[in-house]
Structure formats: C-alpha cells, structure tokens
Amino acid sequence: KERAGNQYQMYSNDIESDSLEKIKLENDLFKALKHGNEFVLHYQPKVDMRTGNVIGMESLIRWEHPIYGLLPPKTFIPLAEETGIIAALGEWVIRESCRQMKEWYDEGMTNFVISANLSPQQLNQKNLVSTVAEILEETEVPPALLELELTENLIIHNTERTLSTIHELKQLGINISIDDFGTGYSSLGYLKDFPVDTLKIDKSFIDDITTNSSNAAITDTIITLAKSLQLDVIAEGVETQEQAHHLSEKGCHLIQGFYFSPPIEASEFKKQVSTIQTK
Ligand code: C2E
Ligand code: CA
Ligand code: CA
Ligand code: CA
C-alpha cells in the first residue's frame, strides 16, 4: 500500500543504484534539454508571518521523464553538473523563472520576488552575468524582482572569482541569497565582503528547533547575525505551526516550507496565493 504513494521515491532509488540506468538517464538528459519541454519548474511560496502575505517564491526544477515520471532534482542535478549540462539547464531555469514572473507580474502580482537556485558551476561560467542581463532585458522583469540562491559552500570555496562575479550580478540590480546557511562550517568573515541580501537558514536546523536547544541556539545566532549585518533572514523547511511561531518570535518572520505550501505548479500557485494569505 505504501508503494502507490511512494513511486517518486522508488524511481529515485532505482536510478541511484543502477549505473546502466544512469548512462541512459544521461543520454535522456541531453535529449530532454535539446528538445525542451520535459523540464518544469514548481514554485514554493515564501510568506511574511507579520502580514501573512506571500512575498515571493522559489522555483524548483523537476523533470517530466517520459518513462520514469516526475523526477526530483536530486536524481538529475548531480548528473547535469558532472556532465556540464548544468550550464544550459541552469540558464533555462533562470529564463523560465523570469518568463513566469513576467506573466504573473502582468497579471497584477507585482509584489513578489522570484528566486532561482544557482549551481556552483554556473558561477564559474564566463558568460553568466551577461546571460542574466540578457534574460532580464528579454523578459522585461525588473531586476529587483529576481533573486539567485547560492549555497554557502560555493561561496566559501571560490572566494576571489566568486566575489567579483557576485558583485557584477549585484550591479545588475538583482538579489543574492545564501542558501543552506549554517551548514558551511566556515568562518563568517566572508559575509562582510560579499554583497548578499538574505541568509536562508538551512532546514536541518529548523526540523527540531522546538526540541533541540543547540539547533534553537544556532538559529537564534543566525537571526541575530542577519539583523546586525542588516540582511534579511528566511527559514526553509518549516513544516509546523510551532516552528513557524518559534521563528517569528525570535525575529525570523520570513518562512518557506510545507507548513504553508509544498512547491506547486505555476497554475496552482496563483490560486494558492489567496488562500495562504488567510492562513
Ligand atoms: P533547496 O534549494 O534547499 O530547496 C529546498 C528543498 O526542500 C526542495 O526540494 C523543497 O521541495 C524542499 N522543501 C521545502 N519545504 C520543505 C518542507 O517543509 N519539508 C521538507 N521535507 N522539504 C521541504 P527539491 O525541490 O527536491 O530540491 C532539492 C534541491 O535540489 C534544492 O534544495 C536545490 O539544491 C536543488 N535544486 C532544485 N531546483 C534547482 C534548480 O533549478 N537548479 C539547481 N542548480 N538546483 C536545484
Ligand atoms: Ca534553494
Ligand atoms: Ca535551501
Ligand atoms: Ca537545504
């Protein structure tokens, strides 16, 4: 009985354990990108607890595989990174995020910031900044409404080059968020050099925030740090009302997680926005 609901998980496991499948998947990945249409973005709302308003959404990629069905990013993003396909795939993600954003914008949803995940390798692409600039121009999305989420590890391990690229991205007028914040095992010194706007507290701290005093303390510290550096702070993976209220009381009012909504299709997103606001 578990199977029906668990197919998504089953396919992922199969793929990870079977190298023949992996080669085939790699082949499929090339094709899927070349012919387009097999990738889709789902959108997860970000909510401001103070107002109950949706303030933005994160775009999260899925692959509508003709045989395996809807595949989660962990089954193909690592492969896309290994094979270099991520450059083109990542560009598609930014372009599609902006295209969708512009559509919503024209429908009157003008107060949202859309966030796209950036793979470490994309940051090393020579043409990243000009590509982002082009996409913004082409889609006519106001740069201030685009955010790129970079993982903390990426920033730490790439300092010089990364720093100048991020400065150039910032000069386009877009926002930079540090994803999975707190998991990077690093000194926090880099924060003063990087022109970032937001810290996103990793889900691993949020999971047991109401029962684990260490994780509660780390979260508190991140919130305080963000405040003193005048950065926004958001928590990811918030699943319960207790977690959401705990965070909001500690001064982290921006919440993303299943508590409000899982990532959903674009058409669902528009409907959900109004119901979330009354939660
Ligand atoms: P992430 O950026 O940390 O994204 C958050 C992940 O947590 C998403 O998984 C989301 O569906 C899931 N999530 C959100 N709220 C909750 C919650 O309350 N509970 C639980 N259990 N999970 C929650 P998803 O969509 O499977 O994405 C996984 C990772 O794949 C992302 O982690 C990101 O690193 C990567 N990814 C997704 N889309 C893209 C993309 O377009 N480009 C790149 N380079 N990476 C992507
Ligand atoms: Ca993210
Ligand atoms: Ca994250
Ligand atoms: Ca995470």
Image (tube, rainbow, N blue to C red):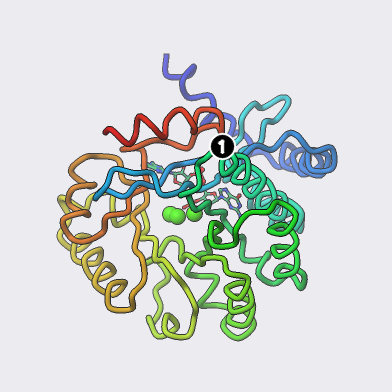
| Image quadrant occupied by the N terminus | top left
Quadrant of the displayed image that contains ligand 3: bottom left
From what the image shows, is residue 193 above or below residue 88?
A: below
Residue type marked 1: Glu
**Nearer to the camera, 118 or 49:** 49
From what the image shows, is residue 241 above or below residue 208?
A: above
Q: What residue do we see at 65% from left, 37% from top?
A: 40
Callout 1: CB less than 8 Å from ligand 1: no
Residue 37: x and y in percent read 75, 34
**Nearer to the camera, 124 or 107:** 107
Q: Quadrant of residue 277?
A: top left
From what the image shows, is residue 62 above or below residue 224?
A: above
Q: What residue do we see at 39% from left, 61% from top?
A: 200
Left or right: residue 80 compared with residue 243: right
Q: How many marks?
A: 1
From what the image shows, is residue 130 above or below residue 159?
A: above
Helix, strand or loop status at disc 1: loop
Residue 198: x and y in percent read 41, 66
Q: What residue do we see at 76% from left, 54% from top?
A: 88
Report the residue marked by disc 1.
107
